[in-house]
Image (cartoon, grey):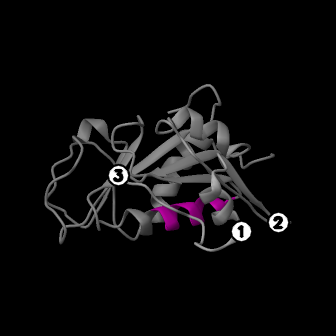
Amino acid sequence: MTTGTGIPVVSVVGKSDSGKTTLMERLIGALAERGYRVASVKHHVHDFDIDVPGKDSWRHAKAGAAVSLVSSPSKLGMTRTMDHEATLEELQSLAGDVDIMLTEGYRRAGNVRIEVSRHARSTELVCEPRELFALVTDNTELEVGDLPVFDLDDAGGLADLVEATFLKGVPHGD
C-alpha cells in the first residue's frame, strides 16, 4: 500500500504472543542491513506512555502540553495528545524521509498484511488468506493456496519478497 506520500506500508498482524514483535525486529534489521530506511509503528488499542514518569518531558505533558518534544544530537522524540486515532496516512507523513513503513498490529487499516501464526498459540489465522501478502508460520497444516509462506526464522526470505515487491532493490538515496 502506498498513499500520497508514496511510502509503502506493510503491516505485521497476528494473535497476541504469536511472534509479531520478533518478526518486526528481524525484518527491520534485514531491510536496514540492505541500506533501506525503515519506519516502524506499533499499534496499541489502549492508552500508553512512552515517556518516563518524573522526567521533564513527562512533567511537561502532564502539565498540559499538547505536544512534548525531546531533542538530542542523535534522537528526536515526540508525544502529542490526539482527539482521534492517527490514520496510516498521517503516520506516513510523520515518518518523513524513509523507504518503507512497517506496522505491527494494524489488522484492518492496511492493505498489505503479513500474518504471523505460531502453532502453539493458535491453529487459525486472524485474516483470510486472500487478505494476506504473506504468511510466517511453523504450522505446515494451514491451507493458504498460493500465498507465500515463510518459516518463523526466515526474515531474510521475507525481506527478499518485501524488497522485490515494494523497494525494487534501490536503497534510500541511491
Distance CA(mark 3)–CA(mark 1)? 35 Å
Q: Residue at x 52, y 56 (%)?
A: 159
Mark found first going from the N terminus, 2 or 3: 3
Disc 3 vs disc 1: which is toward the camera?
A: 1
Which label is found at residue 72?
2
Side (left or right) of 40 relative to 117: right
Q: Residue at x 51, y 67 (%)?
A: 25
Mark found first going from the N terminus, 2 or 1: 1
Vertical placement of 142 versus 111: above or below?
Answer: below
Q: Amino acid at mark 2?
A: Ser
Q: Position of residue 160 (x, y in %)?
A: 52, 54
Q: Residue at x 81, y 66 (%)?
A: 74
User: According to the image, label 1 marks what residue?
Assistant: 56
Q: Amino acid at mark 3?
A: Val
State which region is magenta: 24-34
Q: Could you classify mark 1 by the number of other residues whose Cα lies within 10 Å: few (under 14), some (14-19), or many (20 or more)?
A: few
